[in-house]
Image (cartoon, rainbow, N blue to C red):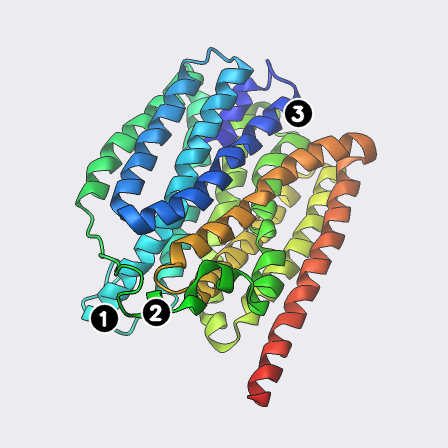
Amino acid sequence: MFASVLQVYRGNLDGSQVNGLFGAYALGLVPALLVMAGVSDRLGRRRVLLAALALSALGSLVILVSGGAFGTILAGRILVGVSAGSAFGPGTAWIRELSEAGRAAGTGTAGGAGAGAGAGAGARRSAVALTAGFAVGPLLSGVIVQWLPAPEISAYLVHIALVAVTLPVVWRAPERVLPAAGQGGRSSDPGDGPVRVLTTRLFLTAVLPTAPWVFGAATVSLAALPVLVPLGGYGAVGGGVVAAVTLGSGIAVQPWARRRSRRSPAAPFRAGMASVVVGLLAAALTVATGSRVLLLATAVVLGSAYGLLLVSGLQLAESLAGPRSMSTVIAVFYSLTYVGFAFPVLVQVLGGLWGPASVLVAGSVLAVGSLATTLLAWPLRRASRSRA
């Protein structure tokens, strides 16, 4: 939501403050991700999700009464980040658990998947749900900012109302009871501990180098480019459209990523990083030319990179984790992805020194390095299997 509402504050705040407010979300999100994942393992997914929703509404309320003061908006953004961090890891684990329960029962879940659903169904559903929220939020708030009165009030009221509608739905959702540690299953296996999972060669060579580019690609498209490319008198709704195209492309590409990962887990990682490289070069050309047509094309490429890396990273993280470590491993994965929220700030700051187009080209060079790590990960794995 905040990506489009930022347009309201641009007249009163400088560029670094505006991009700082966008990235401040991650300041609250990352610590909450790491802490609340373990809490949800002990207290259950439902309790944590209900608390996260309530905190989300509180964050919007703080911004609503801020009067445009930078410090108060910053505090509200951090609260919203804490709420999101509290929700993403437990929510993703919850969806995975319900997907597995539906597959085991043969009754299926939303979308008609039953006993034949693939092992990656939970990751796909989580990624689609997450991406859909990121896509619809900026588009809806862009319409509010562009055409409704007092958008600095109405946008937050809409969010608070949506939270109120969602709370009873979450309250009634079924929840799987996890076995206590040491009571059988893989949960008692020290090899399933989060530290063991996070230090595996595959996590370090495939997930760690690519995860920051998940939101790095997305935020360059939806936060940095609409500021650097003139959108005329339709800045708010135009930014919302760019965000929707970016994240809609991320949704559209995820079924392909899931199918490809069945044959080759490396394929969606490599395709995602290749899309980052191409997308950043296209972004540099977009900034240099100011072309709105090229802006939309770039949004498709960077959005596809986001979708490919998100669903493939989630699937791999889930496959490496055991039941008791899953929420924590997912939280670490999301924490790594949210490093990418700093990318628009870096483009803003470093662009003032070297020019934004040059910074984007330099970013593409770094992305090539991450692509190279994915080329090393799976050949090593195949070699170890053959030796075994």
Picture quadrant where residue 15 is located: top right
Picture quadrant where residue 223 is located: top right
**In percent of the image, x 66 and y 29: which residue is there?**
230
Residue 153, given in percent of the width and then of the height, sits at 39, 17
Task: Tell me the amino acid under the disc marked 1.
Answer: Ala
Residue at numbered disc 1:
104
Tag on residue 76?
none
Quarter of the picture holding the C terminus: bottom right
Decide: is 93 above or below 234: below
Residue at numbered disc 3:
16
Tag on residue 186?
2
Q: Is residue 192 left or right of residue 25?
A: left
Residue in the foreground of this view, choosing between 13 and 332 = 332
Q: Is residue 175 left or right of residue 337?
A: left
Give the distance between the C-alpha atoms of the residues marked 2 and 3, in whole angstroms.
47 Å
Q: What is the count of numbered marks?
A: 3
